[in-house]
Amino acid sequence: MVKSSNIGYPRIGENREWKKALEQYWAGKLEQKTFLKEMETIRLTHLKKQQEKGIDFIPVGDFSFYDHMLDTAAMFGLVPKRFDYKGGEVSLDQYFSIARGSKKAVASEMTKWFNTNYHYIVPEFDGLTPTLVDNRPLRFYQEAKEKLGIQGKPVVIGPITFVKLAKGYEENKWQEVVQQLVPLYAQILQELSLAGAEWVQIEEPILATTIGAEELVLCQTVYQTLKEAAPSLKINVQTYFESIDQYQQVVSLPVDGIGLDFVYDEGANLTSLKKYGFPQEKVLFAGVVDGRNIWRNDLQRTLVLLDEILDVVTKENLVIQASCSLLHVPVTAANEKQLEPVVGEAIAFADEKLTELTLLAKGAAEGKEAISFEIQESTNALTSLQKSSYRNNQDVQYNINHLQTFAAERQAAFPERMAIQESVFQLPILPTTTIGSFPQTQEVRKQRLKWRKGELSQEAYEQYIEQETKKWISIQEELELDVLVHGEFERTDMVEYFGEKLAGFQFTKFAWVQSYGSRCVKPPIIFGDVAFQNPMTVKETVYAKQLTSKPVKGMLTGPITILNWSFVRNDIKRSEVANQIALALRKEVEELVNNGINMIQVDEPAIREGLPLKQQKRETYLQNAVYAFKLATAFVENDTQIHTHMCYADFEDIIDSIEALDVDVISIEMSRSHGELLTSFEENSYDKGIGLGVYDIHSPRIPALEEITRNIDRALQVLEPKLFWINPDCGLKTRGEYETIEALKVMVEAAKETRKKL
Ligand code: GLN
Ligand code: ZN
């Protein structure tokens, strides 16, 4: 018998009922009691579903009202002082205040969970002493047992990962912080053991990043203590998202099971497994189904992988899992009827993946004949997609094989280009501009919805968009901005808009994934060869341009952002998909230039997001990213000005790559970290056009003149005025019209004042 297991299940529900309940509760439309009851129903439904699918190890405690890191912090009473917490169990409202802020206190910081698009709430230690105020895993273990008779597998984030991802302690004291938590974890395990739990899943994804010897040494002693605290409770130390560099040390941790990812590691864990073996007495929780992409499993191939694993571990000691929690994929593919049939057949979301897990467990136990029908089905589906014309676009493939024939370097170096562009555009010093979008008001959305439903004709919709564009061109002229934009009124979303116009994309109806809190995203699927079909932005941009004598920036989303915000086909390398997108965008750039648009912004807010967890893989990723960006943009003549925009990120370790993009102007969000960002650019003596956002667009507040002037002055202390641009932090689509205009007035005023001082 080979068992199946699940690491975690999506919280949001098939129809996002979780999101809806949360938002109603926050809006005061749902009483706490009703809210809790609804959440319980969702939670139990999910457990039942996993049981019906035949999963042997069903996770409990992975469910959350917001985020699992926040849950862990709350369990230890780690409530930042500003929330007036008096000890004891953290109340629901306190819990949500930490995540979302309250009238009196700002929310805790939120940041990306490893290299996924899920964001967690960063725990703050700041002088707090952790105490166990709620044995959360126990609570959920008992609930599943009492209400459904399910012997669940409690899950919890491990102490090393928890502390490493938290903040508010001196970096060199992190080991002491871990030691503070160890007795609390020990108590959790003891109570679980007493209650009859058999296994616990302790998640330590930090072990799959580049970690030092120190972490591993501490890991040994921590898990030794935990094991001794509850000897009869079996511990699985679960890793995911990558392979383990220090394989031998990790598999010899004094615990009962080790969870390894065999999908996202480029074969490294399997190689280690074969080379060093696996401790005989331990259970291997093998992640063999992709937990974060939406493709159907190639059962035949996975059985081969499992065979190799079974050369090292016995069937009794093998448990089959997805590579990570299914939190990162949508709930069910059953409702996506509108997809191209070859795509519809080739996808698997959380529920379908659970079925795959039990099938694979059966196949591994009884031999492939036991699931031969299902193997055939999966092979057929994947082969049909592979053979379809969508994946065999001859032109695209020819171009990809002849990339060296596409210029991907600017003709002249920046100083020479700058001189040429100065004479073309004739801009004042410290030119003012915006990042692209203007307010997407209720009305704009309403019109688009009507058009989508067929209640508004194509013509009428286009007319409406033109009217908005016209209105905002004249607003921008009145504001005396120097470089104008068309406003992006035709776009819902910066990736979807392009995906809908390019070949190779599909859009789902219900495939939502939690991004942070109740916020869900519905990433497009890149399933085929990506190709340019028709101009995507020319009409709107040219329309705007003929309304004014000022330069109008064309506005595109870059290849890496499109890639990182989509579910991507896995039959070819991601870098190749990026190059396909780049070649398609290159055509769009060409079209824009041919139509007289010679200032073009190609947004890349998601470059940093795709950075691999392992240090040794970063260089290649960044090189590929830079290449794809330049493939799309760098072929233009010297008199065409290429801009890019990036939202806030930690730029320090990627600044060389930003420089290598060789754009004429970059605009970057600044408000959240003025000082740090400036230092990175100063230390690297960045020497091309640069616009550091001079006011925060996330708040409706209208900035004061002194505030903006101060931001400009600070930047000009380290950056050359000749290279400096003045712009807001990011696009303005989420802002209201009034506040947008007022804030921009102040910004332009600040630019004028500063110019006088120069
Ligand atoms: N051009 C986009 C906009 O203005 C950029 C958005 C972003 O950086 N996320 O909305
Ligand atoms: Zn931005």
Image: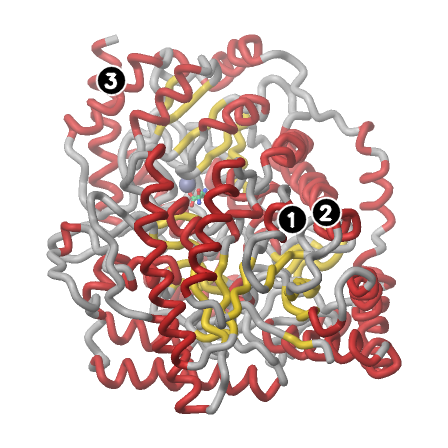
Q: Which residue is mark 2?
A: 268
Quadrant in which residue 648 is drawn: top left
Mark 1 or mark 3: name the one nearer the start of the chain.
Answer: 1
Residue at the image point whose x is 28% and y is 60% from the top: 76
Foreground disc of the pair 1, 3: 1
User: x and y percent of residue 530 in the render?
Assistant: 72, 50
For residue 542, say whether it is visible.
no
Look at label 2 and name its amino acid. Answer: Ala
> What distance separates the C-alpha of mark 3 from that of mark 2?
50 Å
Which residue has dot 1 on it? 243
Residue drawn 27% across and 75% down?
24
| Label 2 vs 1, first from the N-terminus | 1
Mark 1 close to ligand 1, CB under 8 Å: no
Amino acid at circle 1: Ser
> Which mark is drawn over residue 358?
none
Within 10 Å of disc 1 (Cα), the crowding (few <14, some 14-19, many 20+) is many
Q: From the image, which quarter does the N terminus lie in?
A: bottom right
Q: Which residue is mark 3?
A: 713
Residue 356 in sight from this viewpoint: yes
> What is the x, y in percent for residue 578?
68, 43
- In-front residue for pair 545/316: 316
